Amino acid sequence: MPNIKSSKKAVKVIAKKTDNNHELKMRVQNLIKNCDKAIAAGNVEEAEKLVKDVQKYSDKAVSKGLVKKNTADRQKARLTQKVKNMK
């Protein structure tokens, strides 16, 4: 445990950032999973809506350095291709 006041604050800040980062990464993963479920169910409107959300939150994760750019681009490309093939 830290004894210095600034170190105590740093521990709190790091914990908060870690939680926020984890929440964003899980949101992206859950959106991808939900989009795959919508595609499997044949729900075109829901899948298109989820693809837009995936793109939005993937780009946020990339900008924060949580996910590599190529990984996010690959995931987005695969999802959009699946949705295109549904139509």
Image (spheres, helix red, strand yellow):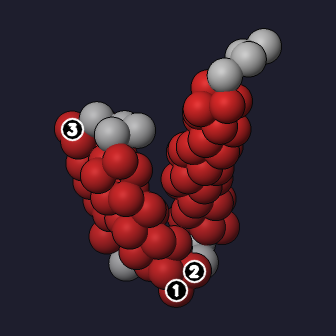
- Identified at 61% across, 67% down, the residue is 38
Which residue is outermost to the top? 1
**What residue does disc 1 label?**
45
Q: x%, y% of residue 78?
A: 33, 50
Q: Give amino acid for label 2.
A: Glu
Q: x%, y% of residue 86?
A: 41, 70
Mark 3 surroundings: few (<14), some (14-19) or many (≥20) residues within 10 A = few
**What residue does disc 3 label?**
70
**What residue does disc 2 label?**
46
For the residues labelled 2 and 1, say whether their Cβ atoms are less than 8 Å apart: yes
Q: Secondary structure at mark 3?
A: helix
Q: Give amino acid for label 1.
A: Glu
Does 44 appear above or below 13?
Answer: below
- Identified at 78% across, 13% down, the residue is 1
| The one of 24 and 73 positioned closer to us in this rendering | 24
Marks 2 and 1, how far apart at CA? 4 Å
Mark 1 surroundings: few (<14), some (14-19) or many (≥20) residues within 10 A = few
Q: Secondary structure at mark 2?
A: helix
- Identified at 37% across, 59% down, the residue is 60
- Identified at 49% across, 80% down, the residue is 49
The quadrant of the picture occupied by the C terminus is: bottom left
Q: Give amino acid for label 3.
A: Asn
Relative placement, left or right, of 2 versus 6 is: right
Q: Quadrant of residue 22?
A: top right
Relative placement, left or right, of 73 versus 23 is: left
